[in-house]
Amino acid sequence: MVPIWKRPEILKLFVNRLNFPYYCETRLLFIISPEDPFYKANKKLVKGYDFFEHKNDTLGEKKNAGLQYALHWSWDYFTEFGSDNIWRPELWRILEPYFSTSDYFGVNNGYFWDLKTDKAILIKNYNSGDAIGAARCIKRNIIEDVGKLWRDDWDSGMDGCSHLAIEKKGYKQTVIDIGEQPLTLDIKTATNINPFFSIEDDGIQVDSEWVKEQFDITNKSIDPVYFTTIEIEEFWRRVEVKTQVCGKESAFNQVNTEYAQAFGRPRFKNYETYQVTISQRFKK
């Protein structure tokens, strides 16, 4: 199951690098949201795959609805990825023996790459010793017993929330230590609930060119038009949120400062430049 929100340039990368286990049948479900500014682009990218529509607010509710929809199908294990995850085919070889020995398992380490700054890190034991969300496998009987894996009123903390719900029912997780193998990659953009700078200090800095090579990413893999549009739209959204408690220009200055702290330079030269850009791109 793969929830989608914005970032068609990342979703395109995801779809183009899909690979599945050779030892079992796999069915993929995308969850898209009609209010997504890039709904049409994202829907086009997942053409040919199963998809389910549900509003994005909240993410917990969206994921619960998608999983309930998937329960109408026949399957043994549920595996979740984010649309900003990429994985190498070797991942399935690592997971294969656990499908016959464990009901609940996943890997412990993952690589993270920030699209804007081109920085990359390896985080060991990302979820405090629990498995990371990407490629975590849960047997169907656990899901039917637990019910909702995520809280409907939550927008973040999805991995920990679902793990706690499963653990409360008495199920134990098998965590596979993969060392520093580059098996999963999480691509960070401004749209992420947990941006790169919020986790950067938790990881080990690694060569981003090496990381991109491991996951077959080149400078031509990301569509710059999509990226620029998403980046500016996300900046505008943050300004609008802050405008609820202060003036628009003050809100702009706050967001521009936050952007500079995260990426080393402000996104806009001044408020006037921002106004012109937003007027041209979003007709606001």
Image (cartoon, rainbow, N blue to C red):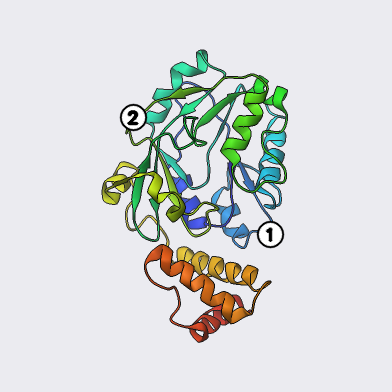
The image position of residue 197, as x and y in percent, is 43, 55
Q: Residue at x 51, y 13 (%)?
A: 100
Q: How many numbered callouts?
A: 2
Tell me the number on the disc at residue 263.
none
Q: Residue at x 67, y 33 (%)?
A: 149
- Which element type, helix, strand or loop, lies under badge 2? loop
Q: Nearer the viewer, residue 136 or 126?
A: 126
**Dot 1 amino acid type:** Glu
- Which element type, helix, strand or loop, lies under badge 1? loop
Could you give the CA–CA distance between mark 1 and mark 2, rounded to whole angstroms? 40 Å
Instruction: Report the residue marked by disc 1.
Output: 35
**Residue 78 appears in which quarter of the rendering?**
top right
The image position of residue 47, as x and y in percent, is 58, 48
Q: Residue at x 58, y 75 (%)?
A: 251
Tell me the number on the disc at residue 179.
2
Quadrant for the C terminus, please: bottom right
Answer above or below: position of 49 versus 249.
above
Q: Nearer the viewer, mark 1 or mark 2?
A: 2
Answer above or below: position of 161 versus 262.
above
> On the rendered structure, is 19 left or right of 235?
left
**Dot 2 amino acid type:** Gly
For label 2, the crowd category at 10 Å Cα-Cα, with few meaning under 14, some 14 to 19 and many 20 or more, is: few
Q: Is residue 281 visible?
A: no
> On the rendered structure, is 177 left or right of 64?
left
